[in-house]
């Protein structure tokens, strides 16, 4: 393989900057009533894409909003499809590599009402959508089938904090299986159209630590959470068998035709979580974000823990596939905190590359402020600040700093 550029990028997801009247989340979260189009990126995208050039990234991770492409089960919207094609065309013109996420948490409402992931037909419906996309976008090289399937499954089918709001173990297990099979279908469809395609998942990975280091129960929980949350889906694809051994489950093992259906692992890394055994909490565990190293917490309440990036990259690397940091970022309006967050994580990344880990890219989350799933409009992750009333985008000083950091490193990160 010839020389390949390290991908320096920023990431967004369609719904979080565009909204969509046809999506499940549009009616799920009342806060969106005041801002249904969020940043109005749906119409302002050409201006927003110029910001990429301004920063100087060579890659852009974005998602296609399924509910805009297929607003009703029997209706495909060509205009919506054309707009996403236009985004790819503009990126190509600017020599920015598109990395497309097919599914980033949201669904068309009709899909979730009739074919939620715990129903087997979900696989077929998702495959129809993927075929439709792939016919139009076939030559795109980098694809992410699902963003954070672990979060989607836990939030949607066990904890109930995300659509469809189910809290049921059996549904959760079925959803797990169907979603993995849908990933495998998408993998085959993408490769059928373009043998050069590189198809990954973006996995949310956290560092889990015992709240009380002396407590065997806290230590046990941290180990289980790590194996289960960080690794179980990736392991299922590697060995072709889904094994769920979370303490609350009976042991579940199911063979699935998944083996080898992954070309790279996307890692979304944000924080470390301390776990405390507590019989009064759901599932017997309290999740805590602690500022144990004095780096501070983000506006999400998350610990800033740069060293954890190396830990999760090491874990992801054990699967023997290239790794890409598909998200890493901080919600804060404090410029110095944001500067430090980015710089310290990039330093860790540089160290990992020097140690020989096969890491292909880094995507800062996020290009601009957006709607944040469980938090609304107050979590300022953006390199560009968005005024949600006037829709003005304003470069934060951090945008320049990120530009500077990646320019300085881009010469050295040739693979
Ligand atoms: C990740 C999601 C992304 C964004 C960040 C903060 O879990 O993939 O959409 O909300 O968290």
Image (cartoon, grey):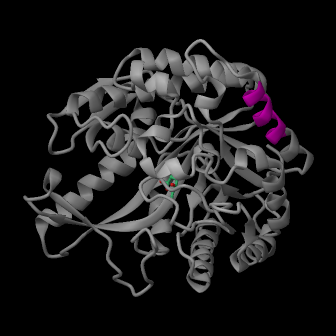
Q: Is residue 168 left or right of residue 127?
A: left
Q: Is residue 294 left or right of residue 91?
A: left
Q: Is residue 112 above or below residue 246?
A: above
Q: Residue at x 67, y 18 (%)?
A: 76
Q: Residue at x 40, y 74 (%)?
A: 303
Magenta span includes 91: no
Q: Position of residue 10 (x, y in %)?
A: 69, 58
Indicate the quadrant where residue 154 lies: top left
Q: Is residue 339 above or below residue 40?
A: below
Quadrant of the rendering where the C terminus is positioned: bottom right
Q: Is residue 60 above or below residue 173?
A: below
Q: Does the magenta stretch mainly form a helix, a strand or a loop?
A: helix
Q: Position of residue 146 (x, y in %)?
A: 53, 37
Residue 269 in view, yes or no: yes
Give the magenta-colored segment's residue range.
79-88
Identify which residue, 212 or 22, lies in the foreground. Answer: 22
Q: Position of residue 201 (x, y in %)?
A: 54, 41
Indicate the quadrant where residue 199 lies: top right
Residue at far right of view: 93
Identify which residue, 153 or 76, lies in the foreground. Answer: 76
Q: Residue at x 60, y 68 (%)?
A: 349
Quadrant of the rendering where the N terminus is positioned: top right
């Amino acid at each position: 393989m010839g020389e390949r550029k390290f991908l320096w990028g920023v990431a967004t997801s369609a719904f979080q900057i565009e909204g969509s009247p046809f999506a499940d989340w549009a009616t799920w979260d009342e806060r969106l009533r005041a801002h249904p189009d969020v940043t109005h990126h749906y119409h302002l995208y050409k201006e927003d894409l110029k910001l990429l050039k301004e920063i100087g990234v060579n890659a852009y991770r974005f998602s296609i909003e399924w509910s805009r492409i297929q607003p009703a089960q029997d209706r495909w919207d060509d205009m919506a499809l054309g707009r996403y094609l236009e985004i790819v065309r503009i990126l190509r013109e600017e020599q920015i590599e598109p990395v497309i996420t097919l599914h980033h948490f949201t669904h068309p409402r009709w899909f979730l009402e009739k074919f939620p992931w715990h129903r087997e037909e979900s696989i077929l419906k998702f495959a129809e959508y993927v075929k439709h996309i792939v016919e139009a976008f076939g030559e795109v090289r980098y694809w992410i089938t699902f963003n954070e399937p672990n979060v989607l499954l836990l939030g949607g089918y066990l904890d109930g904090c995300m659509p469809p709001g189910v809290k049921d173990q059996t549904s959760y297990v079925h959803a797990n299986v169907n979603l993995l099979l849908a990933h495998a279908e998408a993998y085959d469809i993408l490769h059928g159209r373009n043998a050069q395609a590189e198809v990954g998942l973006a996995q949310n990975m956290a560092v889990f630590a015992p709240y009380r280091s002396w407590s065997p129960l806290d230590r046990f929980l941290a180990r289980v959470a790590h194996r289960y949350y960080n690794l179980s889906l990736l392991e299922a694809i590697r060995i072709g068998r889904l094994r769920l051994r979370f303490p609350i489950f009976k042991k579940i093992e199911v063979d699935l035709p998944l083996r080898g259906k992954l070309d790279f692992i996307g890692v979304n890394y944000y924080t470390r979580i301390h776990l405390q055994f507590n019989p009064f909490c759901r599932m017997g565990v309290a999740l805590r974000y602690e500022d144990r190293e004095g780096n501070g917490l983000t506006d999400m309440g998350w610990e800033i823990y740069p060293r954890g990036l190396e830990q999760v990259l090491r874990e992801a690397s054990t699967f023997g596939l290239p790794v890409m940091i598909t998200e890493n970022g901080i919600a804060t309006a404090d410029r110095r905190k944001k500067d430090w967050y980015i710089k310290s994580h990039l330093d860790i990344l540089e160290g990992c590359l020097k140690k020989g880990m096969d890491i292909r890219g880094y995507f800062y989350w996020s290009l601009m402020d957006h709607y944040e799933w469980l938090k609304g409009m107050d979590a300022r992750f953006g390199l560009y600040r968005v005024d949600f009333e006037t829709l003005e985008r304003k470069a934060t000083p951090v945008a320049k700093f990120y530009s500077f950091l990646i320019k300085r490193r881009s010469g050295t990160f040739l693979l």
